[in-house]
Each structure stands twice: as C-alpha cells, then as structure tokens.
Amino acid sequence: MTATNHALTGAVIGLAVGQPLIALPAAFLSHFVCDALPHYASAEPPEKVLKTGGFRDYLMVEAGLCALIVLILAVTRPDNWLLASFCAFLAASPDFFWINRYLKTRAGQVWRPNLFSRFAQGIQWFAKPIGAVFEAAWAAAAIIIIASFIRA
C-alpha cells in the first residue's frame, strides 16, 4: 500500500482510539494488515522501477503527502491530533526498512532479502496495477473518517 494510505490509516487509528498504549502499536501493526490487502504495484520488475528517476519523484510526493496529513492535523487540531500524527508516522514507518534495497539497487549492487523483507513480501499477495482502485477507495474512506473527526 502507498505510504500515504498507511499514514491515513494510522491517523484514523490515533483519532479513533485516543489511547497511546493501544493506538501506537495498533498503528504500527496496521502497516502489515494494509499490505495484506489488495493494493497497487507496478507491473515492471522492482529492480527496474527502483532505478528510475520517476520512482524517486514518487517517493518525494509520498513524503510530501504524509507531511500534509500531519500538517492538516496540526492546523485543525481535532481531539487526539498529536497521537494521530505519531500514529500516521508509525503506520508508514515499516517501509523505511526497504531503504537498503532501494540504495543498493540504485547503485547497481546485489540486494539480498532478509527475514523482514521476506515476511513483508510474503503478505503482499495482491500487489498489481489494478490495486490502485482499491487504494483510491481506501484513501477516500480514510479522508472521510478523518474529516468527521476534524468537524466534530
């Protein structure tokens, strides 16, 4: 799933749960639940995609959208907004473990999967271009839920 959708999911958890001892681990674990749902992935092999400038630009857009989520929470300050911001970060954070693959692939070096990457890849049973439809619906639902907390 995209980092934006992970962050939106974490924000929803933080806003809805409101208890840090429950919300923070739930947000982190939500990353793996979301990755087990149908989601977008390029039809191209990852080694080809990771080397493109377009992928680097995509990462920058994703980082910007995640920051925008936190900025909106900070400006509107719904109940539990700070917890929701931390949860947004925690929900997206497992993707930082892929940085080694990205850097090695960009440098033309061989990347070897570790225990985490094998687990993370194994749960992504449906990562295909058509998964973008599911991701768009997921994002829309999360935005509607977050907006309801902002208006409350």
Image (cartoon, rainbow, N blue to C red):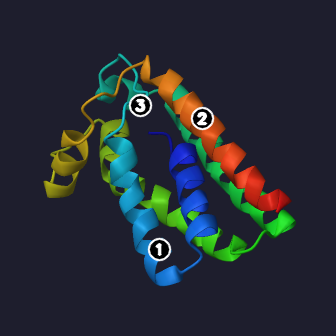
Tell me, yes or no, if residue 53 can be seen here.
no
The answer to whether residue 84 is left or right of residue 121 is right
Q: Which residue is disc 3 drawn over?
A: 39
The residue shown at (42%, 67%) is 26
**Residue 132: x percent and y percent?**
50, 24
The residue shown at (62%, 40%) is 141
Label 1 to label 2, Cα distance in Å? 29 Å
Disc 2 or disc 3, which is closer to the eye?
3
Q: Quadrant of the C terminus?
A: bottom right
**Residue 116: x percent and y percent?**
20, 56
Labels 1 and 2 touching (C-beta < 8 A): no
Rendered view: 34 above or below 124: below
| Helix, strand or loop status at disc 3 | loop
Question: Which numbered disc flags the more N-terminal residue, 1 or 3?
Answer: 1
Foreground of the two, 45 or 138: 138
Q: Which label sits on residue 24?
A: 1
Foreground of the two, 21 or 130: 21
User: In this figure, what is the number of numbered marks?
Assistant: 3
